[in-house]
Structures are given as C-alpha cells and as structure tokens.
C-alpha cells in the first residue's frame, strides 16, 4: 500500500508483511515567476516560468498554480521552462493536466525555451509531439496572437 500526504512534507509509506518501511520525501517549494501579456485584441496570456526541478516534490504545487491561473486569470497559458533543469513523470503529468484544463476552457497551452537537460525527457517520452513547443517566449506569444486573430 502506498500513501502520499502533503502535510509539510510528503510521507510515503510502503507496508510489507513483516514490519514496515517508511520513506520520507521532503516537500520542496517551487520558485516561479508569473507575468501577464496582453495580445493586440486584448486577450490576456499568463506566462509562468518555474525554476529548478519539476518533479514529485514540486509538481503538485505547479499543477495547483496552473489550475488557479486557468480558472481565475486566463485560459491562455505559456510555460517557459528555460530555468527548469530537471523534469520527471510527475512534472510531465502536471503539464499534461494544465494543457487539458486550458483546452477544457477553450484556451491554449504552449511551452517554450525548454532547458537542454529537460528537452531530452520530452523527446524520449515523445511528449514533444503532444505539446506546442517553441524555441523562445516571443515565438510562443507571436504564434498565439496569430491563432487568436483567425
């Protein structure tokens, strides 16, 4: 049985037949910059730039931030991953969930400036074909402006 709880830290318990094995993973706070860009037609676009690791210890915070932005601020999101030097399956899952949420609200979800070390994860998992990924933040915003106009 595996239980994960976030009360100041993740607590993963793995029960075994004889005794139990207890593993603790420290909860990490993800650092994130947020800005808002307004297109020529007045559409707000939220730009999130997390930094550090997007992994099991930070992905849930990032996921909550994405949800909050999509529901309360704008259904158009650009995630700049230039400062994320490590991403695991939990991080990818939070990105997929954000993309689905934006789609549910008829918005858009774009990724840009993927750190070279994280880019390999997108390629190996073939997630680079799932997301709209741009080289720079400017390209992501330009493309978004053109799509909203059509």
Image: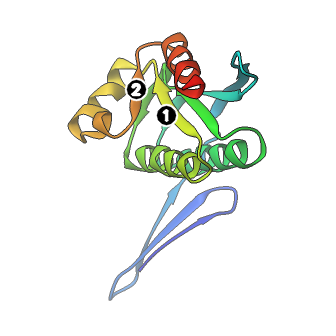
Image quadrant in which you'd find residue 30? top right
Q: Which mark is residue 133?
A: 2
Residue at 57%, 51% (x, y): give it.
101
Relative to 44, residue 58 above or below: below
Residue placed most toward the observer, 119 or 42: 42
Find numbered disc 2 in the image and state the secondary structure of the residue it sits on: strand
Residue 137 relative to residue 121: left or right: right
Mark nearer the N terminus (1 vs 2):
1
* Dot 2 alpha-carbon crowd within 10 angstroms: few under 14, some 14 to 19, many 20 or more: many
Where does residue 34 sit, x and y in percent of width and height?
Answer: 70, 26
Residue at 41%, 44% (x, y): give it.
92
Where does residue 3 sit, x and y in percent of width and height?
Answer: 50, 73
Residue placed most toward the observer, 80 or 131: 131
Q: In what quadrant of the picture does the N terminus appear?
A: bottom left
Residue 55 relative to residue 7: left or right: left
Q: In what quadrant of the picture does the C terminus appear?
A: top right
Where does residue 62 sit, x and y in percent of width and height?
Answer: 60, 43
Q: Which mark is residue 45?
A: none
Residue at 58%, 20% (x, y): give it.
145
Label 1 close to label 2 by CB (< 8 Å): no
Return the residue at label 1: 53
Residue at 59%, 27% (x, y): give it.
148
* Dot 1 alpha-carbon crowd within 10 angstroms: few under 14, some 14 to 19, many 20 or more: many
């Amino acid at each position: 049985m595996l239980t994960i709880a976030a009360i100041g830290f993740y607590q993963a318990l793995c029960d075994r037949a004889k005794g139990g094995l207890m593993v603790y993973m420290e909860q990490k706070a993800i650092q994130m910059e947020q800005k808002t860009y307004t297109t020529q037609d007045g559409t707000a676009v939220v730009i999130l730039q997390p930094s550090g690791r997007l992994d099991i210890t930070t992905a849930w915070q990032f996921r909550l931030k994405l949800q909050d932005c999509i529901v309360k601020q704008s259904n158009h999101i650009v995630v700049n991953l230039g400062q994320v030097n490590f991403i695991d399956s939990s991080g990818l899952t939070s990105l997929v969930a954000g993309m689905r949420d934006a789609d549910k609200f008829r918005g858009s979800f774009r990724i840009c400036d993927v750190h070279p070390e994280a880019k390999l994860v997108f390629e190996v998992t073939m997630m680079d074909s799932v997301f709209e990924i741009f080289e720079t933040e400017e390209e992501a915003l330009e493309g978004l402006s053109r799509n909203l106009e059509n």
